[in-house]
Structure formats: structure tokens, C-alpha cells
Amino acid sequence: MSILLEAEHLTKTFIQRGKNPLKAVNDVSFTLKKGETLGIVGESGSGKSTIAKLLTRLTDITEGTLKFEGKDITRLKQSQLKEVYGDIQMVFQNPVGSFDPRRTLGDGIGESLRNRGMKKADVEKRVAELLEQCGLEKEYAKRYPHEVSGGQCQRAAIARALAVEPKVLICDEATSALDVTIQKQIMELLKDLKEKKGLSFIFICHNLALVQMFCDRVLVLYEGKVVESGIPDDIINEPKEEYTQRLVDAVLS
């Protein structure tokens, strides 16, 4: 499989007035191959979400290199990032908060299509198709974020991310705000998208059980550093680090 995304020695340092600099991400390296799902796990504050923002260039990289399909995208500026955003999309933890409350779900899903010059009628047709792919009827396009459940809103958020036909979907704790039943439904949807569309995923999560079910490989983060990596079954069944063992125990308890 060809490599889509390559991160080399990624570091993000936040400068805080009156405090020591904080390295939220510290010398992290990994690759993501076409059709592969890479899990990133760790406790709150381990640097998982910061990595997601670095990969989507929502946050500038302090040190290191980020390449997509062999092209260095580390220092691209706003006007140059349009192509990157078409290839790499993110699904956030809080689906309702990720939509504009003043606009319908259909408006939010279709925004990127309108920005690319698609005609209104074609946008509406495509939005209906995307909603259907994600298990929602086309009527949901007319609803506002506060008018649907968290699970329905997350399905709409996934539909929005798929609108530009990305190659990589980054899920940043995309199921953690949902109850167990809805969480299972969203995971089934992601698995279906992976199989049918051949998408590559970065699956950021604190739940090792979900990672074991969905991911091909996993990175374990602690205080911004990768402390362990490998196949999920190996990491869970024979963790090498005490920190990883604590994560495993948290699932079993």
C-alpha cells in the first residue's frame, strides 16, 4: 500500500506568558497508508487533539515535517491549503458545536460544494445522497443542529466531511459524546465507509476497545510522546509500558 500521510518528528510547543513553554506534541513520527486506519490513544492532555490540528494544519507546526502523497505541506499558508482540505477532513467530538446553529444541516454539508462552484440544484442532490450514505433521510437537510439527536448530528457531520471526497478522514473522539448504542451505530457507519470507499482513517480515541475493533495499527501517547506502537491486539494483550497497561485496565474495569 502506498503512503498517504507521513509525519516526521512533529513537535508543537505552546508559549505561555509567565510559564515554561509547553510541548503538547513532542517528536512524534508515523505514516498512514492508503486504506489503513491508524489509532491514536491516550488520556486527556496526552496531545491527541493537538496532533489532529497539526495534521489538518488548523495549528502551525513548531518543528518537524508533514507530507501528504509525498508533498511537503508543513508550511503551506491559508491560500495554499485549499487542496489539502479537500484531501484531509476531520470529524469533531462535539457534532452539534461543529455546525453553525443559525444554518440548516443541509447548508453546512453543502458549503464546501458551493465554494467549489456547484450549482444549487446539484448541491441539494448531492447533499441528499450524502445524508443517505450516512443513514439519514434527505429531509434532515432542512433541520437545524438543535433539532436532531447527537447521533444524527454526528452522521450529518460525517456527511459534511465526505462532501469533498477526501482521502483521509480524521475522527477526533468522534464517538465519545454519544451513548453506547449510538456509538456502536456510528462505528458501524465508519467501518462501512472504510470498506466501500477505501478511506484512510486517523482514529483518535481514549477507548482501546474501539481502537482494537476498528484500527490496523495504534500509537499510544503520553505527555505528547509516543510511548508504544503496534498492532492493537498486541498492544492490548501484551502492553510493554505501565501507562498502556493503565489504559487497558480502564477498559476492563
Image (cartoon, rainbow, N blue to C red):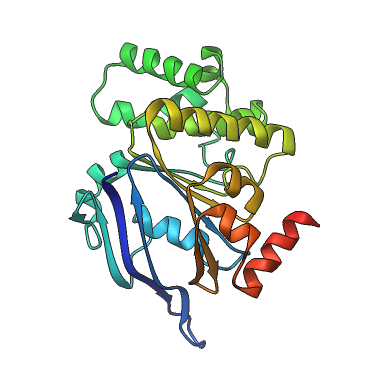
Q: Is residue 198 left or right of residue 119?
A: right
For the N terminus, which image quadrant? top left
**243 or 73: nearer the eye?**
243
**245 or 82: nearer the eye?**
245
Question: Residue 194 appears at what percent x and percent y?
Answer: 44, 33
Above or below, comparing residue 137 to residue 17 in the picture: above
Q: Residue 54 appears in which quarter of the rendering? A: bottom left
x 38%, y 12%: residue: 125
x 73%, y 33%: residue: 181
Q: Residue 13 appears in which quarter of the rendering? A: bottom left
Question: Residue 105 appears at what percent x and percent y?
Answer: 51, 26
- Residue furthest to the right: 253
Question: Residue 66 appears at what percent x and percent y?
Answer: 28, 61
Q: Is residue 5 left or right of residue 188?
A: left
Above or below, comparing residue 161 to residue 13 in the picture: above
Question: Residue 96 appears at what percent x and percent y?
Answer: 59, 38
Residue 108 seen in the current view: no
For the C terminus, which image quadrant? bottom right
Q: Is residue 99 left or right of residue 66?
A: right
Above or below, comparing residue 184 to residue 43 in the picture: above
Residue 177 seen in the current view: yes
x 25%, y 44%: residue: 82
Count the marks: 0
Above or below, comparing residue 36 to residue 158 in the picture: below
